[in-house]
Amino acid sequence: IVELATDAETITGTDTSRAITPANLQAKVASATAKGIVELATDAEAIAGTDTERAITPANLAATTAGARVYNSANQAVADVTLFTVLFNSERYDTDTIHSTASNTSRLTCKTAGKYIIVFLGSFAANATGFRSFQIWLNGTTVIAENNGAAVPGAGNLTSCSVSSIYNLAVNDYVEAIVYQNSGGSLNLLTGA
């Protein structure tokens, strides 16, 4: 014969001589300061990010991570003194149909509202004349990040740059990479992965 623990004894968790029931377990709720039973969040609850009583699993975490990594598998010729919208014909990954390799290939379009880290890395072919500009544009009109600099001097030296922003995107907002150069002639933006 075994004595059943009360809810209070179950919550305390120090009694070693009484048995607990499923009903007792319901009283032992986990919190930031107490061990206990916790309900798992659904993907929708994890994405919303507002529930303070449910636990997130690795699968839920994957569902909350929207992102894409895109590149162009060929060099792109950038005319002198012209803003050029970079095209991306290949993807390393795309977890939320953010990018299309068939239409609007310059765009990464937000499908899940939230805060995003947006990064563009690029390299121009060697040419020591003029300066280079690397930008991230929002919805085709607003520059949200920019990095400008003189071309790297010396024969054979590429001019490479990164530009980034942390930005709150709404559903259907899109970002594009824009480059500019004034070397005196057309200059290749090199293929990148």
Image (cartoon, rainbow, N blue to C red):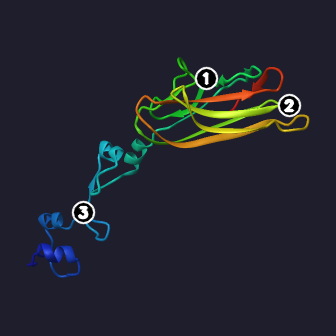
Q: Position of residue 145 (x, y in %)?
A: 60, 39
Q: Which residue is mark 3?
A: 37
Q: CA distance from mark 1 to mark 3?
A: 48 Å
Amino acid type, label 3: Ile
Q: Name which residue lies at 83% across and 38% down.
A: 152
Left/right of residue 159 with respect to residue 192 in the rendered view: right
Q: Name which residue lies at 79% across and 36% down.
A: 159
Relative height, residue 52 to residue 158 (above, below): below
Residue 129 badge? 2
Local crowd at mark 3 within 10 Å, few (<14), some, or many (≥20)? some
Q: Nearer the viewer, residue 33 or 5?
A: 33
Left/right of residue 159 with respect to residue 140 in the rendered view: right
Q: Position of residue 39 (x, y in %)?
A: 25, 55
Q: Quadrant of the C terminus?
A: top right
Q: Position of residue 158 (x, y in %)?
A: 81, 35
Local crowd at mark 1 within 10 Å, few (<14), some, or many (≥20)? some
Q: Nearer the viewer, residue 62 or 186?
A: 186
Left/right of residue 16 with respect to residue 158 in the rendered view: left
Q: Which residue is mark 1?
A: 89
Residue 193 seen in this snapshot: no
Q: CA distance from mark 2 to mark 3?
A: 66 Å
Relative height, residue 23 to residue 58 (above, below): below
Residue at the extreme right of the image, as rendered: 155
Q: CA distance from mark 2 to mark 1?
A: 29 Å
Marks 1 and 3, the one that precedes in the sequence: 3
Q: Label 1: state its secondary structure.
A: loop
Point out the frontmost of discs 2 and 3.
2
Q: Label 3: state its secondary structure.
A: loop
Q: Position of residue 122 (x, y in %)?
A: 70, 34
Residue 26 seen in this snapshot: yes
**Res. 177 image quadrant:** top right
